[in-house]
Amino acid sequence: MSLPVNTSPKNNNHPEEGDTNNSWSVRIAKVSGIPIRLHFTFILLLAFIGISGWGSTGLAQVGLLIGVFTCVVLHELGHSLVAQRYGYVVRDIVLYPIGGVASIEQTPRPRHELWIAVAGPAVNVVIAALIALYMQFFTPDSAWERLQALTQQGRAVTTGTPIETLLLVSNISLVLFNMLPAFPMDGGRVLRAVLAIKIGRAKATRIAAGIGQFIALLLGLVGLGILGNGASPMLVIIALFVYFGAGQERAAEESRDVMADAPVGEAMMRDFATLAHGDTLKHAADVLLAGSQQDFPVVAGGEVVGILSRTQLLRGLARDGDSAYVATFMDRDITFATPNEPLEDYLLSSHALRRAPVLVRENANGELLGMVTLENAMEFLTLRQIARLREDSDSGDDRKR
């Protein structure tokens, strides 16, 4: 039920990027242009519940799980539709056993992130209100009476608990849990957005991530039963998800802060080899061995037509031998950038690994000027971080004087 925000360029070379096939998930629907996918682990969970509770009980449990995750999908659509309203691209929604994830391209502005984060829990509030109204007018007991009875029983789920009561409890739980100020949960993102308006996104992220990891440790202790309660393996899994998610978000924000205002041209490598469209794999192998370059632009008639990676070269040698042609195995899906574009648009992306390297040219039809690989980009960021630390150290020394 978190809302990861992935920075990614609006690249004309990837017009269908939001609907890219995912070998680990299957698409079940598409709403407002947003693919909704089931991760294979969720499918395995449905199968496990159905088989382990074979018969009416198992089917009822599967039905309840589908109902709860329908509410989760609506929760994520709340995030996604508000994000679209502000002009951000939503790549997809993926359902996992522990919840849903809406992946949003670009980094929302603080005020936008605030409303995007609030939108998901607001959907669950509306669902809970509708269920409560239904119970008020169409069932013998009101929602309040049902909740009181469950509280007196000391547990939320019993064998005879009606489905509408379970869905009511689930939606209330989704709201309360997601609004914990534990980054990267929705409440943590609300906290980060509010802080970012006052103190900037980088510092706000460090504070929100620190609070999130502290709450994750508390959840982990509760899940392990160390605080005197019963153990809950699922709570431990959620605690790990929150802890590492907060750490990843903080690391991504630190990288974003380091590369702020850095153009692609500063990080690109200018000394590189190219291959011709008609070269053999033997020639490509010779070029590979002659230096440290791992990816090679392939040109034909002065125009870049593909990229041959080391992996593709080795696969081609193993399959067809060294007399095969580069054109057979090169990747024709190329990402281009211009020197003045922001570097973070191409590195802080969920597709960064797939897109690398980025080829740099002056304009859409211009000459190839350089290329940005993950390796040289990381070296650039390391050097920039060292320079920044030295500047901060020098500033501190000046203040002491």
Image (tube, helix red, strand yellow):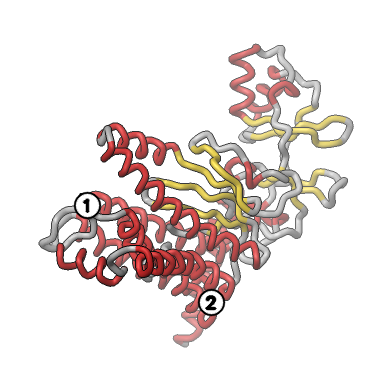
Residue kind at label 1, given as amino acid type: Gly
Residue drawn at the location 31% of the way across and 57% of the way down: 166
The percent coordinates of residue 271 (x first, y second) are 72, 42
- Seen from the viewer's position, the closer of residues 31 and 237 is 31
Residue 2 lies, in percent from the top left, at 44, 59
Q: Nearer the viewer, residue 312 or 97?
A: 97
Q: How many marks?
A: 2
Mark 1: few/some/many CA within 10 Å (<14, 14-19, 20+): few
Residue type, label 2: Gly
Q: Quadrant of residue 353?
A: top right
Mark 2, secondary structure of its residue: loop
Please state if 366 lies on the left or on the right of 171 as rendered.
Answer: right
**Residue 90, horizontal then vertical, whole percent:** 61, 55
Q: Is residue 389 above or below residue 33?
A: below
Give the number of the disc on residue 200: 2
Visible in this render: residue 221?
Answer: no
